[in-house]
Amino acid sequence: MAYGIGDPSRTSNTYSRYNYYTKKDEIVTSVNTVYDRYLIIEAYDDKNQVWKITVKSSGSSGNLSKVMPVLILSAMDYFGVSKQIIKFQNKRK
């Protein structure tokens, strides 16, 4: 078994929006940090690999203790199946 988290990537987005309180346009910049997380589980029969699951996800959390249960749950249907790669994108912040 192997697991980890990649270096964070940061993106910024600048846009203009109208502020109804001040009745003026304002410039807003948002910065997003995205982490690539992975989990690899392998099963062996003697010295031969029987199956392997690689789970990858990207999202705003760099906390593996919060992400790991989600990675494991997403892979459960594939335990015992031939080699699989599972990818999903975290839509929540």
Image (cartoon, rainbow, N blue to C red):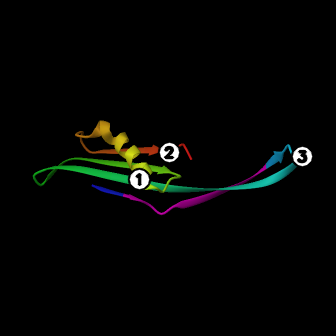
Distance, label 3 to label 1, CA atoms, is: 44 Å
Q: Position of residue 28 (x, y in %)?
A: 75, 54
- The residue drawn where x is 85% and y is 50% is 25
Q: Is residue 89 above or below residue 6?
A: above
- The residue drawn where x is 24% and y is 39% is 81
In the displayed structure image, the side of residue 41 where residue 45 appears, left or right: left
Q: Which of marks 2 and 3 is nearer the N terminus?
A: 3
Q: Is mark 1 on a helix, strand or loop?
A: helix
Q: Earlier in the sequence, mark 1 or mark 2?
A: 1
Q: Which of marks 1 and 2 is in front?
A: 1
Q: Residue furthest top?
A: 77
Quadrant (top left, top right, bottom left, bottom right) of the N terminus? bottom left
Distance, label 1 to label 2, CA atoms, is: 15 Å
Q: Residue furthest right?
A: 23
- The residue drawn where x is 44% and y is 50% is 66
Q: Residue furthest left?
A: 46
Q: Which of marks 3 and 1 is in front?
A: 1
Q: Name the residue under label 3.
A: 23
Q: What element carries label 2?
A: loop
Q: Name the residue under label 2.
A: 90
Distance, label 2 to label 3, CA atoms, is: 35 Å
Q: Which amino acid does label 1 sit on?
A: Ser
Q: Where is residue 87 in the image (x, y as percent from the top left)?
A: 41, 45
Q: What residue type is labelled 3?
A: Lys
Q: Earlier in the sequence, mark 3 or mark 1?
A: 3
In depth, the one of 67 and 6 nearer the eye is 67
Magenta-tinted stretch = 4-16
In the displayed structure image, the side of residue 78 where residue 8 appears, left or right: right
Q: Name the residue under label 1.
A: 65
